[in-house]
Image (tube, helix red, strand yellow):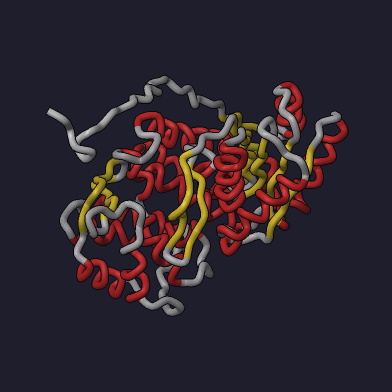
Amino acid sequence: MKLSDREYMETVKVELLKKVDNSYRITIGKGLFPQIVKYIADSNYGKVAVITDTNVSKLYGKKLLSILKAKKVPAELFSFRAGEASKTREVKAKIEDALTLKGFKRDCVVIALGGGVVGDLAGFVASTYMRGVPFIQIPTTLLAMVDSSTGGKTGIDTAYGKNLIGAFYQPETVFIDVELLKSLDRKEMLNGIIEMVKHGIIADKKYFLFMRDNIDRIYKLEEKILIKAIKRSCQIKKEVVEKDEKEKNIRKMLNLGHTIGHAIEKASGYKFSHGISVGMGLVVETKIAERLNMISSIESQRIIDLLTKLDIKIKFSDVDIRDIVKNTLFDKKNTAGKTNYVLPLKVGKVAIDVSVKEKIIFEVLQQST
C-alpha cells in the first residue's frame, strides 16, 4: 500500500539533555573595588564593558574604569540616562550597537554597575549579545543589593507594563559593597528597606522583627548590622531561587506587594519609585488578604504598623484607581485571563496564585486613599 504525500513522515530527534551549573557567589563587604578588579583580571575575559547610568557613571563608573585600566584590563564605559524610562528596546539596541562598534566579541564580560534599572538592562544585554556573554552584578543601591542583583531576572519595560520582555540569565558573580551606599539619600535607602521587610513577611518572622528593631541603625549604615541584614535578605532570595529558578511555582512569593505595586508605579508614570510603590502594594495586598479572611487582623496590623513606621503613605491623588486596577491585568503572574496575587497569611508565610475579584481590589484601593 502506497502512502500519500500527506501521510509520509520522517522524524529526527535532537537530544540535548544536560545538567547546567549556574551557581555563583555573592560577596558582601566594604571597599571591594580592589577585589572586584582582581577577580576580573584573573578571569581572563576579553574586553570589559562597564554598563551604568549617567548618575552612577560620575560616582563610581569612571573610578572603576580607571582602576581596571591601571591593571591593564581593556575596558570601556557605556552609560545611559538614569531612570526607569531608559529600560526600553531602544536603549538596549543602542548599547548593543555601541558594543559591536567597539569590537566586543564573545569573550567579553558585561559589568552591571548600578541600581535595579542598570542590572535589568545590562543583564538583558548580556543574555542576548553574541547569543549570551557573562556578566557581573555590582549593585549600587540597597534595593538592588537585596533584590534584583540576585536571581537572574533581566528585562525591559513596554507600554503595557514593567519587565514584560526579558530573560532569566544568571550572573557570574555578585559583589555587594556597602561603601557604595554612602551616596544614597534616605528615600533611596527606604526603597531597599521595604524590600528587606518584604523578605521577612514572606519567609522569616525573626528577620521581620530584626528589621523592625534595627531600621535606624541601617539608615545610619552601621556596617555589621547592615551586612547582616543584606546577607539574610540574599539568603532568603537564594533559597527561593534555588528551588524555583524560573518562577514556575514558589518563586512567585517574591512578588508579594508587586502586583499592586507595579500597577501603581505604571499608573503614576513612574513618578513613584519602585520601592515606595511596592511598599504601597504591601499595604494594599495585606488589606486584601484581611478582607478575604486569609490573615488575622492582629497579623495584618503588625505588617501595616511597620510599613507605617517607614512612612509609606497611601496617597493616590496623582493616580487614577481605575488605571491601577487596569494595569494589574498585564501582570506577569496572570494566567487564563485571571490576575493572581501573592497574599500574606501571617508574618513569615504567604499564599501564591490567589485569584481576587476586581471589585474587592477597587474597594480596598478606595479605602486606602
Residue 292: x and y, percent? Answer: 17, 58
In the image, is residue 30 above or below residue 43?
Answer: below
Write the residue at 46% across / 45% down.
196
In the image, is residue 97 above or below residue 318?
Answer: above
Dividing the picture into quadrants, the one containing residue 285 is bottom left
Quarter of the rendering occupied by the N terminus:
top left
Is any atom of residue 213 visible in this view? no
231 or 81, nearer to the observer: 81
> Does residue 231 appear to the left or right of 223 in the view shown?
left
Residue 158: x and y, percent? Answer: 48, 62
Dividing the picture into quadrants, the one containing residue 18 is top left
Write the residue at 61% across / 54% down.
92
Dividing the picture into quadrants, the one containing residue 331 is bottom left
Residue 150: x and y, percent? Answer: 51, 38
In the image, is residue 194 above or below residue 139?
Answer: below
Q: How many marks?
A: 0
Residue 131: x and y, percent? Answer: 57, 38
Q: In the displayed orientation, state which residue is furthest to the left.
A: 1
> Does residue 164 appear to the left or right of 363 in the view shown?
right
Write the residue at 45% across / 23% down.
20
Write the residue at 24% across / 72% down.
363
Q: In the displayed orientation, state which residue is furthest to the front.
A: 2
> Does residue 176 appear to the left or right of 261 in the view shown?
right
Quarter of the rendering occupied by the C terminus:
bottom left
